[in-house]
Amino acid sequence: MANSVRHNDALLDTSTTPATGTRKSRSYVQLPDRVLAYHWDTAPPTSTQLSYADSFFTTQESKLLWSASKFRTIDFGSLPEVAFLGRSNVGKSSLLNAVLRCKISHTSSKPGRTKTMNAFGVGGEDGRGNDGRLVILDMPGYGKGSREEWGKEIMKYLVGRKELRRAFLLIDALHGIKRSDEQLLAMFRQNGIPHQIILSKVDRVLLPGARLPSELAVKGRLLELETFLEKARGIVQPQARDGPPALGEILTCSAEKSVEKGKKLGISGIRWAILSATGLENPRRASSDIAVFKEQNEDDGND
């Protein structure tokens, strides 16, 4: 069976204090990234890889590179790109703020808050004068509060950009995959756009309400999540193929709730997926590219 959600790995901090033998307060639920992802075509990242991904995204401050409402007005660059898309109010802006660890993307309870395509440079100066080593694109939401012309502009961009490495489609964990989501997945396949699914707001499924649930309740909800993800596999990789299907892994996350050492649910796994998509998952390779470019510039200056 594929490496999927493992409910037995979700534990409550209910250990005892050695000196007194008394029970500690249950301060958090341990839900590491390995429990929050469903892999069937890919290998889950190791703890070392997740730590590297966190370091990549938090060591250098991310920067807004450009904003545009129309394809023809975009200031193009040559860095590898990933795009984040989803229905209006799916939590995309909150997710990007968590991934980038700064309030760089506007959030709102009203659908359709993102009005433009926004590009963020991540990873610090790349040695070539670029404000980043990869670019994250925040696309306007579709559905309620969106505009019809945005969909056309977004597809123009996704189809025409050779620098695009992957499109991440956010699905609300409470509402599941809607008809409009399936239509967009079909468009990805038909246009050969590499893509992957992320289930957002998973805390509202696993940890609803303000009170900490029992360990048994958490395990039961993780089993329900596992069932949902296995069903979703048939949607993102349909048997009747009309083009390349989604990547064989589904990630889940929460931009709101921290339950393990102050980390937001599933964010480290998303950071790793971004690095893997853009070819920056190897720290030696990324550092070597910068060093080679600097050495070439020094040689040119000496000629």
Image (cartoon, rainbow, N blue to C red):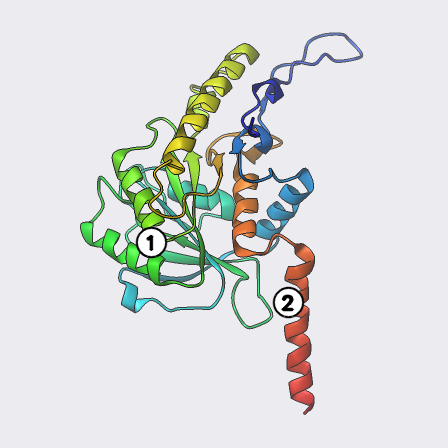
Say whether residue 277 is left or right of residue 178: right
| Crowd around label 1: few <14 · some 14–19 · many ≥20 (10 Å) | some
The residue that mark 1 highlights is 191
Which-is-in-front pick, marks 2 and 1? Answer: 1
Say whether residue 244 is left or right of residue 110: right
Q: Amino acid at mark 2?
A: Asp
Q: Amino acid at mark 1?
A: Asn
Question: Looking at the picture, how far across and down is residue 124, in whole percent?
Answer: 57, 61
Identify which residue is drawn at 37% across, 69% down.
75
Identify which residue is drawn at 45% across, 21% down.
227
Question: Looking at the picture, how far across and down is residue 52, in whole percent?
Answer: 65, 47
Query: Which residue is nearer to you in this view: 166 or 40?
Result: 40
Q: CA distance from mark 2 to mark 1?
A: 31 Å
Comes first in the chain, label 2 or label 1: 1
Question: Looking at the picture, how far across and down is residue 49, in whole percent?
Answer: 65, 44
Question: Disc number at residue 289?
Answer: 2
Q: Using the image, determine if residue 42 lies above or below residue 131.
A: above
The answer to whether residue 197 shows anywhere in this view is yes
Please identify the residue farthest to the right as the structure is shown. Answer: 19
The answer to whether residue 88 shows anywhere in this view is no
Query: Which residue is nearer to you in this view: 270 or 208?
Result: 270
Q: Look at the image and tell me in which quarter the N terminus lies.
A: top right
Please identify the residue farthest to the left as the structure is shown. Answer: 148
Instruction: Look at the numbered disc 2 and give the secondary structure of its residue.
Output: helix
Asked if the residue at tag 1 contacts the one at tag 2, i.e. Cβ–Cβ closer than 8 Å, the answer is: no
Question: Looking at the picture, how far across and down is residue 140, in whole percent?
Answer: 30, 49
Please identify the residue farthest to the front as the structure is shown. Answer: 240
